[in-house]
Image: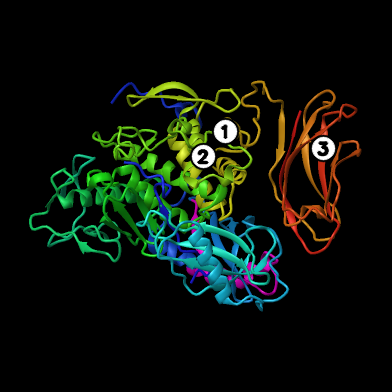
């Protein structure tokens, strides 16, 4: 049992805002290197994956010791990925004295011979709390959770018994309760799965997030299609994990009735025929299953060969669709007036991808990680639609263009310029984590479009696009197929539950390094495309001058010992002349109490430039900022070091990355 896994249900739309062959551009990826075959995911059968999971579960104690975890910490295997070259990426959750550690997930990357190459952690802090005895009662935690749910406008709320956990997602581990509040959200129809984290010592609310993530068939959106059905003709796809499609008949609970038909001809292409929506849902699930298996070697949502199920005709005039981990199913409303079911190819792929995200990185559905969660569903919804190559619903970079969610024929979301919908965000800014995840998702959606196709005006498949960049500088794109591989590898192997946009940059760069090599044109394009949505800085590419200055970066993690000796991280600079008077030092340090830290920049000749002093009163977490140093007396060439010392006890962290911009 994966003790830290949280039930998640994600909806296509933000609840409360529901409203009533062309001249394709050349594929920019054709000029880029093909990904290294050995770094691509191996096509594991469910039995092979199960064997890898079994092997990992049998050695968790040895792995914990190898990682130097505390004596009270244990590992629980959650997922495993393997590359063609035998590199294995095993995802674990942690427990502390038997309690689930939320935010403590990590991925161990091992070579074919079993050597640990690196470890990706959601949080670097030492997992320890003073006591596992709570001062606050479960009833108090439950009452606070119900109050929080009511404040969100939820109706008919009910709460499950709070469970005691260690909350580590904010950096410093805290004994806490997790309470899941059910019922309905403020629209009176969408299920509620509000997770509320309460400090078990003080009773203070620490965090909350919404777990609702949002034969022959005649479909409404894709024309006449072939769908998998079982003998005796039920809508059961026996070749894809026995995926089943049910008719809820406007109910809002249970599974409803499994679609059946006497002649294996389903629907008539109109919403008035109840089978039509079932055809679209089954077809979308079939296409999504095939995409993940054929492109990424993944057999089913969890990789175990087991199909989910779909429910259509949910509620009445329900303008939404959602994925629910609790039932392992997709659910679709019929739209305004019950005439536009939310069952198009991209919507079905969007919902199923929430399941893939939950089974892998498990991105928390709140803040920046929530925006990445939503964007991941849009990204692979787009990929599935292109891969399907259905002439009635051709691939594009528009989300929900078939379901007429706005009542005027416009799409739900635009990936080339997300702000065209009036609310989504084109690029990152401080505070974007406070924006609804359906709108902050625009940042990663925009990144994916730019990485696939490049910036500027172009026509693709008969659709006109014109994608800007936040810094006004162009990016070329690496081709959609390459961009898909980079995002999938980053999601399944390098992202964790609390990854933010900066962390997504790090994850995709590592994926690009694996697939194409570090500092190659493709790798540099990934970095520059993040800069194009205001995440990180640009780097040089192919010898072209970098308008932002030459950037040198070290992304290797360096642990900072608690109240210990100073540690350093080095960058070698091969630049002639003197350093500038405005040398930019970008620092990304994960630490649960940044006031503990003293930070210096050390020049090649040993001269130290103080960037930050310690302060016992600065209790905030993390140092993520850019310092300006007058280093004009220094030669640029040589080894520069970031030196960090933790001068107080009780808190830990690590240097995540740092860079110099000349």
Q: Give the magenta-colored segment's residue range.
A: 54-83
Q: Are marks 2 and 1 in contact (CB under 8 Å)?
A: yes
The disc, 2 or 1, on the residue closer to the chain's N-terminal end is: 2
User: Badge 2: how crowded within 10 Å, few (<14), some, or many (20+)?
Assistant: many
Residue 638, given in percent of the width and then of the height, sits at 83, 34
Between marks 1 and 3 in the image, the one whose residue lies nearer the viewer? 1
The C terminus, quarter of image:
top right
The residue sitting at 49% across, 66% down in the picture is: 180
CA gap, disc 2 to disc 1? 8 Å
User: Which mark identifies residue 590?
Assistant: none
- In the rendered structure, the answer to whether residue 458 lies left or right of residue 348 reads right
- In the rendered structure, the answer to whether residue 21 lies left or right of residue 550 reads left
Q: Residue furthest left?
A: 263
Residue 242 sits in which quadrant? bottom left
Residue 134, given in percent of the width and then of the height, sits at 65, 77
Q: Name the residue under label 1.
A: 533
445 or 48: nearer the viewer: 445
User: Which mark identifies residue 639?
Assistant: 3
The residue sitting at 57% across, 46% down in the picture is: 434
Q: Residue 140 colored magenta?
A: no
In the rendered view, would you say 452 is above or below 54?
Answer: above
User: Badge 3: how crowded within 10 Å, few (<14), some, or many (20+)?
Assistant: some
325 or 19: nearer the viewer: 19
In the rendered view, would you say 162 is above or below 311?
Answer: below
Q: Name the residue under label 2.
A: 444
The disc, 2 or 3, on the residue closer to the chain's N-terminal end is: 2
Visible in this render: residue 36? Answer: no
- In the rendered structure, the answer to whether residue 310 lies left or right of residue 17 reads left
């Amino acid at each position: 049992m994966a003790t830290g896994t949280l039930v998640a249900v994600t909806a296509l739309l933000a609840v409360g805002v529901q409203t009533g062959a062309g001249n394709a551009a050349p594929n920019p990826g054709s000029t880029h290197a093909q990904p290294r075959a050995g770094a691509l995911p191996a096509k594991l059968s469910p039995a092979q994956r199960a064997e890898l999971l079994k092997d990992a579960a049998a050695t968790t104690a040895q792995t914990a010791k190898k990682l130097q975890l505390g004596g009270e910490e244990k590992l629980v295997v959650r997922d495993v990925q393997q590359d063609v070259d035998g590199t294995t990426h095993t995802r674990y959750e942690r427990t502390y004295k038997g309690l689930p550690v939320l935010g403590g997930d990590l991925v161990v990357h091992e070579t074919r011979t079993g050597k640990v190459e690196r470890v990706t952690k959601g949080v670097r802090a030492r997992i320890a709390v003073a006591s596992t005895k709570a001062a606050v009662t479960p009833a108090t935690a439950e009452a606070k959770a119900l109050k929080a749910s009511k404040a969100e406008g939820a109706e008919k709320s009910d709460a499950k018994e709070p469970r005691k956990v260690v909350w580590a997602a904010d950096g410093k581990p805290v004994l806490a309760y997790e309470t899941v509040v059910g019922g309905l959200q403020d629209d009176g129809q969408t299920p509620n799965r509000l997770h509320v984290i309460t400090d078990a010592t003080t009773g203070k609310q620490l965090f909350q997030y919404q777990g609702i993530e949002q034969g022959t068939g005649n479909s409404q959106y894709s024309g006449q299609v072939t769908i998998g059905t079982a003998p005796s003709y039920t809508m059961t796809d026996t070749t894809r994990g026995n995926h089943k499609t049910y008719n809820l008949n406007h109910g809002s609970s249970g599974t409803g009735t499994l679609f059946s038909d006497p002649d294996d001809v389903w629907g008539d292409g109109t919403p008035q025929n109840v089978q039509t929506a079932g055809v679209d849902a089954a077809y979308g699930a079939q296409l999504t299953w095939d995409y993940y298996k054929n492109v990424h070697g993944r057999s089913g949502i969890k990789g175990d060969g087991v199909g989910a199920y779909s429910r259509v005709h949910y509620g009445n005039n329900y303008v939404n669709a959602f994925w629910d981990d609790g039932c392992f199913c997709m659910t679709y409303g019929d739209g305004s007036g019950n005439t536009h079911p939310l069952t198009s190819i991209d919507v079905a792929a969007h919902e199923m991808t929430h399941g893939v995200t939950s089974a892998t990185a498990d991105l928390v559905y709140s803040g920046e990680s929530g925006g990445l969660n939503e964007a991941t569903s849009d990204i692979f919804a787009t990929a599935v639609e292109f891969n399907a190559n259905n002439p009635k619903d051709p691939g594009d970079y528009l989300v929900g263009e078939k379901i007429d969610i706005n009542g005027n024929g416009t799409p739900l979301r635009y990936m080339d310029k997300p702000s065209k919908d009036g609310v989504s965000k084109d690029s990152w800014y401080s505070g974007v984590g406070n924006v609804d995840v359906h709108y902050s998702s625009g940042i990663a959606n925009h990144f994916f479009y730019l990485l696939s196709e490049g910036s500027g005006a172009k026509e693709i498949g008969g659709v006109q696009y014109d994608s800007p960049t936040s810094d006004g500088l162009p990016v070329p794109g690496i081709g959609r197929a390459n961009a898909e591989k980079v995002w999938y590898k980053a999601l399944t192997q390098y992202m964790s539950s609390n990854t933010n946009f900066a962390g997504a940059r790090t994850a995709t760069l590592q994926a690009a390094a694996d697939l194409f090599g570090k500092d190659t044109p493709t790798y540099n394009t990934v970095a520059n495309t993040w800069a194009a949505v205001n995440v990180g800085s640009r780097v040089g590419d192919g010898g072209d001058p970098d308008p932002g200055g030459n950037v040198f970066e070290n992304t290797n993690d360096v642990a900072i010992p608690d109240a210990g000796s100073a540690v350093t991280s080095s960058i070698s600079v091969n630049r002639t002349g003197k350093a500038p008077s405005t040398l930019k030092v970008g620092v990304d340090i994960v630490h649960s109490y940044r006031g503990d830290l003293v930070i210096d920049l050390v020049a090649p000749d040993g001269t130290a430039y103080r960037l930050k002093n310690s302060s016992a009163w600065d209790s905030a977490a993390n140092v993520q900022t850019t310092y300006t140093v007058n280093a004009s007396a220094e030669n640029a060439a040589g080894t520069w070091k970031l030196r960090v010392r933790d001068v107080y006890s009780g808190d830990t962290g690590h240097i995540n990355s740092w860079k110099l911009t000349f």
